[in-house]
Structure formats: C-alpha cells, structure tokens
Amino acid sequence: MMRRLAPVLLGLASLGCAGEAPVSIVMITIDTLRADHVGSYGYFRDVTPAIDALASEGVLFEHAIAPMATTLPSHTSLLTSSYPARHGVRANFQSYQRRVPLDGDDFQTFAQLLKRAGYETAAFVSVYHLRPETGIAAGFDTFDTVPGDRGGQGLDRITRTADQTTRRAVDWLGRRTDDRPFFMWVHYFDPHSPYSPPARYRQAYGDAAALTAFIREKRVPERYEGRTRALHDRYDGEIRFADDQIGVLFAALRRLGLYDDAAIVLTADHGEGLGQHGVLEHGVIFNEQIEVPLILRLPKGARAGERVATVVSLIDVLPTLVSVLGLSVPTAQFDGIDVLSEERRYALAEREYSKRRFGSDVNLSLTGERWKYVYHSEQADSLFDLGADPVEVNDVLADHPEVAAAMRQEILRLVEQYGEEGAALGVEPTVSPEMREALETLGYVE
C-alpha cells in the first residue's frame, strides 16, 4: 500500500529558514545535459559560464544519478522524491494508457506540497513529454507548456527553444504582484537531439585535438569517432545556447531583487550517449546517460563553493531542500535523504522499459562510491569498478563475486520494497522467474 503523508502544516509563519521569511525556490532542469560537459565538472570547453558561476555560489554534487535516462520518469522522480519502482512511470508516453498517479493525498508533487503550504507555483516547460495530461502539472497555479497537437510545424509542435521558455518565465516574474514565496520550475529542452542550435552557436570550436582526446578517453568505439565529433560540436552549441538563456533568467531575478534570497536548484533529467557504448542518444543506464549535474545555491550564497563527492540521487533533492530551508511540508512520501547531512550508500536507476527499443529485459543498476552493479532479468549481470574504470568497459563481476552478490541482493530488496509501497497497477511484466515476484506489482508497460 502507498504510505500516507503526514498532515500538512499550513501557514507561512512556519516556512523558511529558522526565524526568517519563507524562501522562494527556483528549479531549473536541462534536458539531456551530461555532467561531464559542464565546466565546473571538468569539461575542457567553455560552454557553461552561467552554470559555472552558479556552482561557485552554491553546493556542487559531483556524482548525481538520475533514476532513469528518460524525461517524464526522471522528472517525476525529481518532483516526488521517489524511484520509478514506486511512482510507476517508466516511459514518456505511457500516460496514453495511465496518468501519473499524482492526484491524491497519498502521493503528491513538490508543487502540490508547497501550494498547500502557501506558495505560489509556476512551471515553464519546453517539451510535450511534460504536458499537463500526464499529471506532472499537479499543484502548479501556472503551467506554461508547448502547443502539442494544437498548432505549430514539426518539432515546433512538441518543443520550444530556450529563449522562448526564458521569455515566458521572465514575463511571469515581472508580472507578479503576489507577496507570497514562489516555487518556479523552468525546463529547457536544449540540448536534446537533433542538436540544432541557433546559427551563431554552430561555430567550430577550434579544439579538434582536445575533442579527439576527450572522445577517446570516453572509449567511444572507433566506428563512431567521426560522427561523434560533429555531434559534440552541435550538442555543445545547444548547451551554450541554453546556458546563455539561464544567464538571462538569473539577470531577471537579480533585477527584480529576487536572486539573492532565493534557493536555486539546477540539474538535468538525464545525459546523452554521444557514441559511448555504441549509443548515440539515451534510455539506458551507463553513467554518461544517468550521471547529471546537480547544483544547489542556498539563499545569500550560504555554503558557497562546497563540493559533495559522495553518490547522490535526484530523489534526494526535495528532502535536502526541505531540511536545509526548514520547510514545514510533509516528508513521509520521500524516498530520498538530506544529502547535506546524511551519506547515501547507493543510487538506484533503471533503463526505460520499452519492448520496442530494448526487448523485455528489465535492466537496473546500483551505483556506489566505487562499485556499480547492473542487473538484467534476461541476460548476464555486470559489475564495474568505477575507481579504475569510470567509463564502464571492463566487467569485473567474476573477479569480485562477493561484492556482486551483495549488490544484487540489495537491488532485489529495493525493488521489492518500492514495489510494495507503490500503486498496484496490475500489469504483469515478462521477466525471469527469479525477478517476477519482486516486479509483479510495478506496472512495466509500453
């Protein structure tokens, strides 16, 4: 059964840092942004000056893991502090069959929790995958999205560019007359494929040798090298375009006197393959696809410059915000922890469930400080020593059977736990007999 939430404590007097006014929160998510393409994470190109400036004013989490390399499931995890095994969303378009289960008292988004506690809430999203019909809009007073089936041509029908989204967000900020604190979520679809930045962002970077070295360090198969060089240039152009628009958003917050006292979270829903492991885009669970940037800027730049080296999950964002900001909202549904005061041992992730793309194999991973274990329901499992092999090309399971056995057992335990706490969706997956019992209530559907 779903866990019940504790009663919501209403009234603004109880919100915010101890003894202070309630804190407004800005959450920025950048679709498809790999952590290793961000300057503050060590990238050799200067494509993220606004993000890097934010990192210098905040806490940077060096190893943040997305629960899935797919947009709607990962955002659902971020906004509910729960793994897909519990919220049941495992693909972008499964909502044609079932809404995200976010409309009851048992399970709510951060926007719902904050709205009931007195916040004004607004979202500005850039892709149709996050349309209101999925349920992800629950709790938002304003939910500004793309046209969808109501107009537009080609990609314009289901996406919008970073400058368009920024204009809408800045316009909303400028029109506010409400004195309440606000929660604003801004989602950028750039740098998602097809990597088509505006013309002035399509320049050659002039660092071909450094790019080749980077690609080879990532162990991109040789057959992908030529194509991957061109992809990196366009991908980085889109990152720089999105970063510039984030700079515009920050400038508006400063101009309106809102920046310094706000809490700002910046992260991504997932990364991108770019040829590693023979995958150009995303949907699987190698680290280039699930390791994302995560930066938390606290009001007045508290704890600026800190770096957290331990593994964290996107499901930890809400508990950390609630704890550090002293928010009086219910936390019983949260699967995450406050990673500024506790240390996470493992982060769970799973591959998008799509028989069309991947067959019926259920694929999960468990990432720790050194080891990463990959579970397959219908293939051999794998173990990677991330200290010696951060790009996951050498399976060392046979050399470390005790480590593998312990991590396998933990994956099975977590999946069973979250499945029991989640909604019983009544869809029977096609998996091995060993895993069937643990997954039978989890609702793997196309």
Image (tube, rainbow, N blue to C red):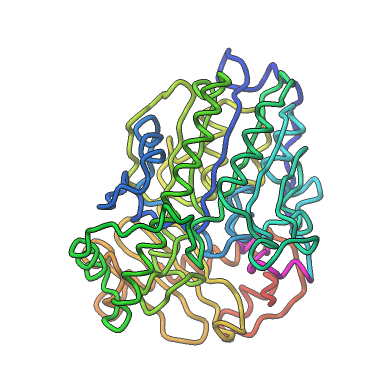
Is residue 94 highlighted in magenta?
yes
In the image shown, does 88 or 333 lie closer to the viewer? 88
Left or right of residue 117: residue 383: left
Asked if one can make out residue 396 in the rendered structure from this viewpoint, the answer is no
Residue in the picture at 57% in, 25% down:
326
The residue sitting at the top extreme is: 19
91 sits to left or right of 117: left
Find the magenta span and give its range: 84-96
Q: Position of residue 239 (x, y in %)?
A: 43, 53
Q: Residue at x 64, y 37 (%)?
A: 169
For residue 293, above or below residue 232: above
At which x and y percent is residue 306? 33, 33
Residue at left offset 45%, top offset 42%: 244
- In this picture, residue 419 sits left or right of residue 17: right
Which residue occupies the foreground of this view, 83 or 160?
Answer: 160
**Total labels drawn:** 0
How far across and how far down the image is residue 181, in percent?
67, 24
